[in-house]
Amino acid sequence: MQITLKLYALLGKYLPPEAKKNEVALDMEEGTTAADVLRRYSVPEEMCHLVLINGSFVPPGARDSATLQEGDALAVWPPVAGG
């Protein structure tokens, strides 16, 4: 199945070289979870503050069970600080 991985801000460095801007289309096996994808690309768990599948929030405790489907978009943002 094909999904889209989008990594924002500092996380963009974890995308493979063929990525365009902040996203890449990936071929993944059926049953792949959000956490599987992030581990595959060595994205540190503590840097995955906001994780969305098709715009729906996936809390940290659900990322190992949030199964992706054909055409899904997995988007991830790091923690943000400001002042």
Image: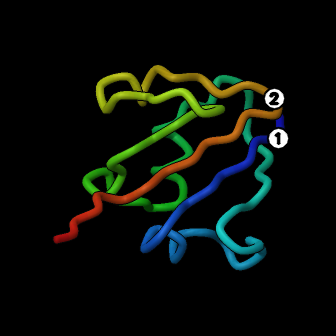
Q: Amino acid at mark 1?
A: Gln
Residue projecting furthest to the left: 83
Crowding around mark 2 (Cα neighbors within 10 Å: few <14, some 14 to 19, many 20+) is few
- Identify which residue, 32 or 14, lies in the foreground: 14
Total marks shown come to 2
Name the quadrant containing residue 21: bottom right
At horizontal 65% and vertical 32% (from top left) the residue drawn is 54
Residue 80 pos. (x, y %): 29, 62
Q: Is residue 57 left or right of residue 60?
A: right
Confirm or deny contact between disc 2 and disc 1 (CB under 8 A): yes
Q: Which amino acid does the dot numbered 2 rest on?
A: Glu
**Mark linked to residue 42:** none
Q: Residue visible at 51% across and 77% down? A: 13
**Mark 2–mark 1 distance (CA, rounded to whole Å):** 5 Å
- Residue 81 image position (x, y, % from top left): 22, 66
* Residue at horizontal 36 percent and vertical 51 percent from the top: 48
Q: Is residue 61 left or right of residue 27?
A: left
Q: Quadrant of residue 3?
A: top right
Tag 1's secondary structure? strand
Q: Is 18 left or right of 34, judged from the image as shown? A: right
- On the image, the x and y values in percent for residue 17 come to 70, 79
- Which numbered circle lies on residue 2? 1
Q: Which residue lies at the image location 73% right of the left edge and 25% below the top edge?
A: 69
In the picture, the quarter occupied by the N terminus is top right
Q: Furthest residue to the front?
A: 83
Q: Secondary structure at mark 2?
A: loop
Mark 1 neighbour class, 10 Å CA radius: few under 14, some 14 to 19, many 20 or more: some
**Residue 31, quarter of the rendered image:** top right
**Residue beneath disc 2:** 70
Which quarter of the figure is the C terminus placed in?
bottom left
